């Protein structure tokens, strides 16, 4: 990333930030909350839902944030549509952040599409990736969860300072990564047909939590059981949060993670170390945390 001197275009406007966040299972929301603490200005956090019309506009805020979980190395479709819908805001400052279960550089090409859409409307300051526990593929250990959250919080504070200083950092994802992300947008189409393969098994007690939580209104209760439509965006809230682990997610069943991470308890547990040494981390995670340590020790 190249650094550029801030233009200070928004100087003089009353300071305030609005963060639009889509979060399937709470990780990205947790990062947004950390930004609220770190930015040190009035910050409103708004959940991106199906009906964009009801969301507050960025008018009256000097800074805009957009946060989302990376899905198949892409922005979830709802966030892509939201970026297209967001009105022109005269080059107002905007920052992007995303979370993912690992720190592969491929995750950094996930925002290519929305950057293109937003470029003409806002001045994009930066784009950051935070490693947070997988809500799909496999469940992370408590030790790894504490490590991830500890680093996320430290990094957000550094990144928030750069944002408040108006530092613009250009992203240059490699073309091959952009191509892979583009191909994997097939996930958007798959997500829609995923509903066909989802069903509740006999342990479902008809509590309707999944239907009440679905951000797309894609789950209806029929005869006391959830029935899934064709507007799924694979937020996986339904299967992740089901108290009976009763929802089968079809072709992705082998990757299902059920049950929340108990962040508060994990962070308060003194028997769990705050961080893990690089050499003890799974190989896949080492480059991301090496970069994080370099940044934090500057
Ligand atoms: C359908 C789907 C696809 C995912 N793809 C990726 C991925 O490409 N890269 C990654 O690092 N994590 C991936 N993940 C993991 C989530 O991005 C990660 O757990 C994220 O922090 C969840 O955030 P949320 O709780 O705000 O939804 C995927 C999760 C789902 C449900």
Image (spheres, helix red, strand yellow):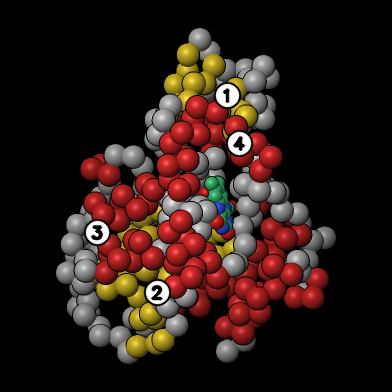
Task: Give the side of residue 1 with respect to residue 50, left or right.
Answer: right
Which dot marks residue 199?
Answer: 1
Does label 3 point to a residue whose CB lies under 8 Å from ligand 1?
A: no
Q: Earlier in the sequence, mark 4 or mark 3?
A: 3
- Residue 120: x, y in percent? 21, 69
Q: Mark 4 points at which residue?
A: 251
Which dot marks residue 246?
Answer: none
Label 4 element class: helix
Q: How far apart are marks 2 and 1 (CA)?
A: 40 Å
Does label 1 point to a residue whose CB lies under 8 Å from ligand 1?
A: no
Relative to 33, is 283 above or below?
A: below
Badge 2 local density, few (<14 within 10 Å), some, or many (20+)? many
Identify the residue shown where x is 41% and y is 53%: 21
Which dot marks residue 58?
Answer: 3
Mark 2 touches mark 3? (CB < 8 Å): no
Q: Earlier in the sequence, mark 2 or mark 1?
A: 2
Q: How far apart are marks 2 and 4 (CA)?
A: 35 Å
- Residue 267: x, y in percent? 69, 58
Q: Earlier in the sequence, mark 4 or mark 1?
A: 1
Does label 2 point to a residue whose CB lies under 8 Å from ligand 1?
A: no
Q: Distance between the residues labelled 4 and 1?
A: 12 Å
Q: Distance between the residues labelled 2 and 3?
A: 18 Å
Q: In which quarter of the image is the N terminus?
A: bottom left
- Residue 241: x, y in percent? 60, 36
Mark 2 touches mark 4? (CB < 8 Å): no
Q: Which of marks 3 and 1 is in front?
A: 1
Q: Earlier in the sequence, mark 3 or mark 1?
A: 3
Q: Mark 2 points at which residue?
A: 126
Q: How far apart are marks 3 and 1 (CA)?
A: 39 Å
């Amino acid at each position: 990333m190249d650094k550029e001197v801030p233009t200070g275009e928004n100087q003089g406007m009353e300071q305030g930030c609005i963060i639009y966040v889509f979060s399937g299972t709470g990780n990205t929301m947790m990062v947004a909350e950390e930004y609220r603490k770190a930015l040190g200005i009035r910050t409103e956090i708004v959940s991106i839902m199906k009906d964009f019309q009801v969301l507050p506009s960025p008018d009256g805020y000097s800074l805009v944030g957009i946060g989302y979980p990376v899905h198949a190395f892409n922005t979830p479709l709802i966030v892509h549509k939201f970026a297209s819908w967001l009105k022109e805001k005269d080059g107002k400052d905007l920052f992007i952040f995303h979370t993912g279960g690992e720190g592969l550089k491929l995750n950094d090409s996930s925002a290519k599409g929305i950057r293109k859409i937003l470029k003409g409307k806002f001045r994009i300051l930066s784009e950051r990736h935070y490693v947070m526990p997988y809500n799909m593929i496999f469940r992370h250990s408590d030790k790894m969860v504490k490590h991830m959250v500890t680093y996320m919080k430290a990094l957000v504070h550094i990144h928030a300072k750069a944002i408040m200083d108006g530092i613009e950092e250009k992203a240059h994802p490699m073309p091959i990564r952009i191509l892979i992300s583009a191909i994997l947008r097939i996930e958007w189409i798959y997500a829609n047909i995923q509903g066909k393969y989802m069903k509740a098994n006999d342990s479902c007690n008809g509590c309707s939590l999944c239907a009440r939580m679905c951000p797309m209104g894609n789950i209806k209760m029929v005869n006391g059981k959830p029935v899934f439509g064709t507007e799924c965006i694979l937020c996986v809230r339904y299967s992740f949060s089901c108290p009976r682990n009763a929802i089968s997610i079809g072709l992705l069943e082998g990757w299902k993670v059920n049950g929340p991470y108990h962040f508060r308890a994990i962070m308060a547990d003194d028997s769990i170390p705050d961080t893990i040494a690089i050499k003890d981390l799974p190989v896949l995670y080492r480059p991301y945390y090496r970069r994080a340590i370099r940044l934090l020790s500057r």
